[in-house]
Amino acid sequence: MVKLLIRFGASVVINKDSSLCLPAAGRFGMTIVSRKHLLERDKQYGKFIINSYFRLSLNKPKTMDFIEISKYVIPAAIVFFTVWVIIHKYFTNIEKMRKVDQMIENTKIITPLRLQAYERVILFLERISPESLVMRVNQPGMTVRQFQSELLSSIRAEYEHNLSQQLYITNEGWEMVKNARGITIQLINTAGDQVQPDAPAVNLSSKILDLIMAAEKIPSGAAIEFLKKEVQTLF
């Protein structure tokens, strides 16, 4: 006989006739059990273990499933959000740097043009100032009517020649230029109304200078001061 150890922790004796001797219900003695009976019992016990496992799996709380899923979903979401923030900041910084570089390049091109525009507009204001006009336009033998017409034509031609410069100076600066031109034209017309049309041109020149002396400030002078302050902001 060979003595075997089975899962139940009991000693089993196998006889030569293939019968089994198991401990009896009492303290002493043996009970004869066939191998077939033991195999049937093991089969039933296996079915019980499998059914119990599936029954426990089906009755497993849903909260446990949610917790298990959360263990994978939450870390993945955190990693995805972190990567997205880093990538977003990276491309945002790249775009800002590109705009800064573009502004620098534009400044290198536009700044000289703006400076040239301010120079030409200030030169225009100097040329249409009453003192400059009187000295430049006056010719011997001209009458007041002819002299007045030449003064207005000179202002008009100078203004039309510099119209394109308004693209490079501020709106406020260009408004000052237009106001200076308008006030100068008004001053010339006012002086022309106070002298005889057929009188010598020197009479109109004297009247224009008298009106300038009576005025608090030369029209073109105020515009020039304003434009000079604007030019300082370019540096």
Image: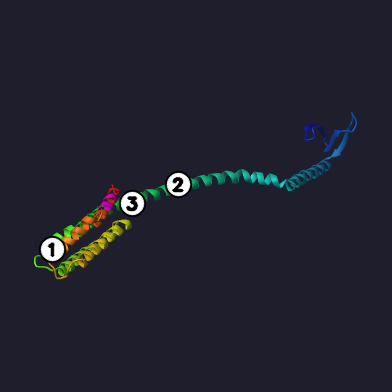
Q: Position of residue 22 (x, y in %)?
A: 85, 34
Disc 3: which residue: 103
Q: Residues within 10 Å of mark 1 (few under 14, many from 20)?
A: some
Q: Which mark sits nearer the N-terminus, 2 or 1?
A: 2
Q: Is residue 108 above or below residue 35?
A: below
Q: Which one is nearer the viewer's eye here, 57 or 73?
A: 73
What is the three-letter code of the residue carrying label 2? Lys
Viewer-side label of 2, 1 = 1
Q: Amino acid at mark 3?
A: Met
Q: Which residues are magenta?
A: 224-229
Amino acid residing under circle 1: Val
Name the residue: 14% across, 71% down: 198
Does label 3 or label 1 sit earlier along the sequence?
3
Percent x, y of residue 112 = 24, 53
Quadrant for the N terminus, please: top right
Place of residue 94 in the rendered image (x, y in percent of width and height, measured from the top left):
40, 48
Q: Residue at x 19, y 58 (%)?
A: 210
Q: Nearer the viewer, residue 218 or 113?
A: 218
Asked whether the viewer can see residue 124, the reply is no
Q: Which residue is mark 1?
A: 202
Q: Main secondary structure of the magenta part?
A: helix
Name the residue: 80% across, 35% down: 8
Q: Which of labels 2 and 3 is toward the front?
A: 3
Q: CA distance from mark 2 to mark 1?
A: 73 Å
Name which of mark 2 and mark 3 comes first in the sequence: 2
Q: Position of residue 87 (x, y in %)?
A: 46, 47
> Badges 3 and 1: C-beta atoms under 8 Å apart?
no
Q: Quadrant of residue 7?
A: top right
For the residues labelled 3 and 1, the Cα–Cα distance comes to 54 Å
Give the residue number, with chain letter if any, for mark 2. Answer: 89
